[in-house]
Amino acid sequence: MKRPRDKVLSREAMVEGFGPGRSFTLAFTNGCFDLLHPGHVDYLARARELADALVVGVNTDASVRRLAKSPERPLVGEAHRAEVVAALASVDAVALFDEDTPAELIKALLPDVLLKGGDYDASRVVGRDTVEARGGRVIIIPFREGFSTTSLVERIRRKGTRAE
């Protein structure tokens, strides 16, 4: 069994192992994954069911800050966020990306299935054109109700209460 940090790959290693020329179906998704919660775990497990392998792009710290989630985010550094995502059995590999979007990583990998969470409209998913041009699919996976990193952070700040 691989150690989680061994599943965190450079972009070059990710493309070499999971890019064009592969003999299996590849699913790709991305996100910040600042505080991993059951909504993330469910989403990634459901994503993995749609292909032979799932790779995840994780925003670097600088990329998260540019998304302007809040001045204090990310709460957890990029290397640790990537390692925690990589620890999930549903995830085959993780790569950090520093750009504002994962468009370049998607172009390099050419996944068969591109996934995003329920707050996205499929027509606006970054990389959609790249994936669909090759006959791939874009799938929106509904959120698991009651879980959001932003709401967890706000709740902790507001009351210091424990999440249920």
Image: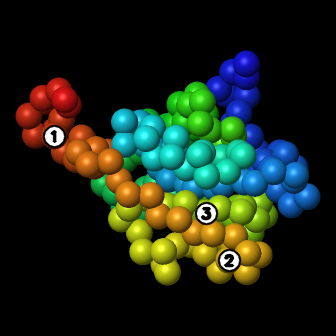
The local secondary structure at tag 1 comes to helix
Determine which residue is flagged by label 1.
155
Whichever of labels 3 and 2 marks the residue nearer the N terminus, that label is: 3
The local secondary structure at tag 2 comes to helix
For mark 3, does the 10 Å Cα neighbourhood hold few (<14), some (14 to 19), or many (20 or more) residues? Answer: many
Whichever of labels 2 and 1 marks the residue nearer the N terminus, that label is: 2
Q: Nearer the viewer, residue 11 or 15?
A: 15
Left/right placement of residue 88 relative to residue 131 reads: left
Left/right placement of residue 50 relative to residue 1 reads: left
Measured as percent of width and height from the top left, residue 84 is found at 53, 31
Question: Do callouts 2 and 1 mark residues in contact (Cβ within 8 Å)?
Answer: no
Question: Do callouts 3 and 1 mark residues in contact (Cβ within 8 Å)?
Answer: no
Q: Residue, x 73% and y 28% (percent of image)? A: 6
Report the disc number at residue 132: 2
Residue sitting farthest toward the left:
159
Identified by mark 2, the residue type is Glu
